[in-house]
Every structure is written in structure tokens, then in C-alpha cells.
Amino acid sequence: IYQLAEDASQILSIGNHTGEGWFLTGEMIDLLKTDVHNIVCMQPFGCLPNHVVGKGVIKELRHQYPKANIAAIDYDPGVSLVNQLNRIRLMMATANKTLKEEMVEV
């Protein structure tokens, strides 16, 4: 947990305790550092802090980790299932395109 906090502190204050606070960012960084580039960030039940932290750090994560393919998905009763699935499909299409490009390079 100390490593997650240290990594997250490079992007936001670990004093941020709303929602999942800095932990969400730390987990995404941990995944990216271990070559897990495709991440679905589920944001449940209109959780404003999760929206602020989750969506707020994605741009910086993509800047620091160019291979990052992160999709923020709202998971609320008011959000259409079609919208959720389309966003996940788009993320998977990007992942497949990147995989094919990497295989050509080898």
C-alpha cells in the first residue's frame, strides 16, 4: 500500500480521501507498471468523487504511460446498457488494434 501511495502522489495528493481517493489512481498505476495497459474504470451509482478522481487522472496517466487504454464507464441505473457496452467495445477495439500493431513490429 505504501508503494501505491508513493506512485499516486506523483499525480495527486494522497490527502485526497473522497471516494476511493488516491487508491484508485495507485491501483491504475500499479496495473500500468506491470504491463496491464487496458483498464476499465467502473464508476458506480453517481459517485461524484470517483468521477472526479477516476476521470480526472486519466489524461495524466495516458501522458505518463502512452500505452494506457483506459475507459471510464458509468455504472448507474440511469445509464443505458448500450452506451456502457459501446464504450467497452471501443476500448477493446483499441486494445486489439494495438496488439496487431505490436505483433507486426515483432
Image (cartoon, rainbow, N blue to C red):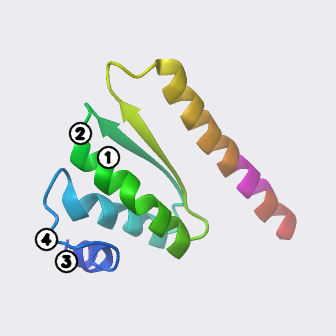
Q: Residue at x 56, y 35 (%)?
A: 87
Q: Position of residue 96 (x, y in %)?
A: 71, 48
Quarter of the image where the C terminus is located = bottom right
- Say which of 59 and 98 sits in front: 59
Q: Residue at x 47, y 67 (%)?
A: 61
Asked whether disc 2 touches disc 1, contact meaning CB atoms under 8 Å apart, the reply is yes
Q: Residue at x 60, y 70 (%)?
A: 66
Q: Residue at x 20, y 59 (%)?
A: 21
**Which residue was labeled with disc 3?**
2
Front: mark 4 or 3 = 4
Classify mark 1: helix, strand or loop. helix
Q: Earlier in the sequence, mark 2 or mark 3?
A: 3
Q: Which residues are magenta?
A: 96-100
In this view, 19 is above or below 43: below
Classify mark 2: helix, strand or loop. loop
State how far apart marks 4 and 1 are (Cα). 17 Å
Q: Amino acid at mark 1?
A: His
**Which residue was labeled with disc 4?**
15
Number of numbered discs: 4
User: Few, some or many C-alpha atoms within 10 Å of disc 1 (few <14, some 14-19, many ≥20)?
Assistant: some
**Which residue was labeled with disc 1?**
51
